[in-house]
Image (spheres, rainbow, N blue to C red):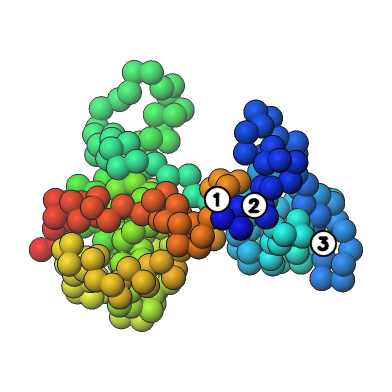
């Protein structure tokens, strides 16, 4: 099992490993001055990401600065005015490729849907009007704006997150991704530059290069997906996050089926 796992789970004869119901573990929420705002359960804390997540507690919003699982504390500062609390943390809820492609098909269609009401149909038609031109042809899926580009893939969360890290390997771009698109900001973000970067990512050689793999592993966020994750060696903890977040074979297949001309 190893010394690290024994330190984490060794109390009470490793009860945490085989107990059907675990007692709630509470984390103190503390300000830099040491004032305790309140407490949070571990299930919520595990979804928080330092310097990104925010939440409401004690009647106000707080931004997470650091999380100490050893001391069971969450260090916070008051959230900037107007920052929206993120109750679910920042571990993304990923939709699969097939589901997102079905959504794209619905948006491209002009038919009414029998099981939705008139109000919902109006909203759907608005989405269709806005997005249909961007997903009808592969070449039109990249939406160029003054200070950013949007790449509408409808490829799902894993593929889009993988594309994000692949693009960042060669370019110092700020990229955010969700299940349907990538938002790309930075210098030299244009159709030609993006097309070249996308072409490079369409081969397995790009993803199998040690430099690419090291870069991606270094960029993975510290998501906690299991209570046992903190007992794993770092390499296996990273592997767990990688398996949850990335899909390199899926990226290669997607890019070769949707080649930009």
The image shows residue 235, relative to residue 210, as above or below, that is above
Q: Residue 31, position in %: x, y?
A: 82, 66
Tag nearer the camera, 3 or 2: 2
Q: Percent position (x, y) of residue 12?
A: 75, 41
Q: Residue at x 81, y 54 (%)?
A: 28
Real-space Cα distance between discs 1 and 2? Answer: 7 Å
- Quarter of image, res 66: bottom right
CB under 8 Å between discs 1 and 2: yes
Residue drawn 26% across the image and 61% down it: 142
Q: Is residue 108 visible?
A: yes
Of residues 199 and 222, the one nearer the viewer is: 222
Between 159 and 1, the one lying in front of the other is 1
Q: Nearer the viewer, residue 36 or 20?
A: 20
Instruction: Give how far across and how far down residue 44 sits, in percent.
Output: 67, 46
Mark with earlier residue (1, 2): 1
- Dividing the picture into quadrants, the one containing residue 246 is bottom left
Dot 3 or dot 2: first in sequence order is 2
Q: Secondary structure at mark 3?
A: strand
37 sits to left or right of 258 = right
Q: CA distance from mark 3 to mark 1?
A: 33 Å
Q: Does dot 1 land on a helix, a strand or a loop? A: loop
Name the residue tied to disc 1. 1
Residue at position x 77%, y 60% from top?
A: 71
Q: Nearer the viewer, residue 6 or 127?
A: 6
Left or right: 185 in relation to 190: right
Q: Quick check: 151 above or below 101?
A: below
Crowd rating for badge 2 (residues with CA inside 10 Å; few <14, some 14–19, many 20+)? few
Residue topped by disc 3: 30
Assign a secondary structure to mark 2.
helix
Name the residue that disc number 2 marks: 6
Residue 41 is at least partly visible in this image:
no
């Amino acid at each position: 099992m190893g010394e690290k796992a024994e330190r984490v789970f060794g109390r009470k004869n490793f009860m945490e490993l085989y107990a059907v119901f675990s007692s709630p573990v509470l984390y103190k929420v503390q300000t830099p001055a040491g004032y305790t705002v309140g407490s949070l359960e571990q299930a919520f804390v595990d979804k928080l990401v330092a310097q990104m997540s925010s939440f409401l507690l004690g009647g106000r919003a707080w931004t997470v600065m650091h999380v100490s699982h050893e001391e069971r504390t969450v260090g916070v500062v008051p959230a900037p005015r107007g920052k929206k609390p993120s109750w679910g943390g920042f571990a993304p809820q990923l939709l699969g490729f097939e589901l997102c492609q079905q959504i794209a098909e619905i948006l491209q269609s002009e038919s009414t849907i029998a099981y939705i009401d008139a109000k919902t149909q109006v909203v759907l038609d608005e989405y269709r009007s806005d997005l249909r031109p961007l997903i009808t042809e592969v070449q039109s899926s990249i939406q160029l704006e003054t200070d950013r580009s949007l790449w509408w893939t409808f490829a799902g969360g894993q593929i889009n997150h993988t594309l994000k890290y692949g693009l960042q390997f060669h370019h110092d771009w700020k990229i955010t991704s969700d299940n349907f698109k990538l938002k790309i900001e930075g210098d030299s973000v244009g159709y030609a530059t993006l097309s070249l970067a996308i072409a490079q990512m369409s081969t397995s050689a790009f993803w199998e290069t040690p430099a690419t793999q090291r870069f991606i592993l270094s960029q993975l966020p510290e998501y906690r997906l299991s209570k046992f994750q903190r007992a794993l060696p770092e390499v296996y903890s990273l592997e767990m996050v990688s398996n949850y977040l990335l899909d390199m074979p899926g990226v290669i297949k997607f890019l070769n089926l949707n080649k930009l001309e």
